[in-house]
């Protein structure tokens, strides 16, 4: 069986796909749709309320961060899975669909359930007290410049 293939090697599992043009679909899910939504959010095309706008900004900023880190990890560590894990690309499509789909807003969910609780503690203990100190010092510095 092995000699039937060019070079005598067996085909990798990545060649198995149940979705035609899965790479194109993945590109649309990973880059095209999020880019469109990011521009809509940046320019507030729908005229959303401030609360909705903030939620959308969180969704897309966190999405692009997740995408960046996933690309780094995939390049450095997961490249082995790409060739030998059957239906890897289809599963990747599903995962990224969950992250970007408006019905799920997976990136915002990850931020609000995993990341934000840790940062709230840091904000309350370190950031807000420092900002309060800076706010008190700012008027004094402004008065010194006027004199």
Image: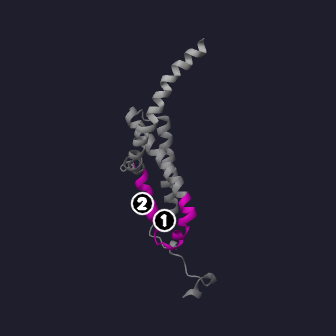
Q: Position of residue 64 (x, y in %)?
A: 51, 49
Q: Residue at x 55, y 65 (%)?
A: 77
Range of magenta residues: 72-101
Whether the magenta-drawn stretch holds residue 34 is answered as no
Which secondary structure, mark 2?
A: helix
Q: Residue at x 38, y 35 (%)?
A: 51
Which secondary structure, mark 1?
A: helix
Please tell me the numbered disc located at residue 48: none
> Dot 1, how many residues are within 10 Å of its Cα: few (below 14), some (14-19), or many (20+)?
many
On the image, numbered disc 1 is attached to which residue? 89
Please tell me the numbered disc located at residue 94: 2
Q: Position of residue 27 (x, y in %)?
A: 52, 56
Which residue in the rendered view is the most extreme toward the top?
Answer: 147
Q: Position of residue 107 (x, y in %)?
A: 42, 50
Q: Is residue 76 above or below residue 139?
A: below
> Dot 2, how many residues are within 10 Å of its Cα: few (below 14), some (14-19), or many (20+)?
few
Q: Residue at x 44, y 70 (%)?
A: 18
Q: Quadrant of the C terminus?
A: top right
Q: Is residue 15 above or below residue 97?
A: below
Q: Residue at x 55, y 15 (%)?
A: 143
């Amino acid at each position: 069986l092995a000699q039937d293939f060019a070079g005598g090697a067996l085909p990798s599992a990545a060649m198995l796909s149940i979705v035609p043009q899965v790479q194109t679909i993945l590109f649309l899910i990973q880059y095209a749709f999020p880019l469109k939504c990011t521009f809509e959010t940046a320019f507030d095309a729908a005229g959303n309320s401030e609360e909705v706008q903030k939620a959308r900004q969180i969704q897309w900023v966190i999405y692009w961060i997740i995408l960046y880190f996933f690309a780094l990890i995939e390049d450095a560590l997961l490249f082995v899975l790409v060739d030998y894990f059957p239906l890897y690309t289809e599963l990747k499509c599903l995962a990224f669909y969950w992250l970007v789909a408006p019905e799920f807003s997976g990136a915002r969910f990850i931020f609000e359930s995993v990341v934000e609780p840790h940062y709230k503690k840091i904000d309350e203990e370190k950031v807000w007290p420092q900002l309060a100190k800076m706010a008190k010092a700012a008027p004094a510095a402004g008065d010194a410049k006027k004199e």
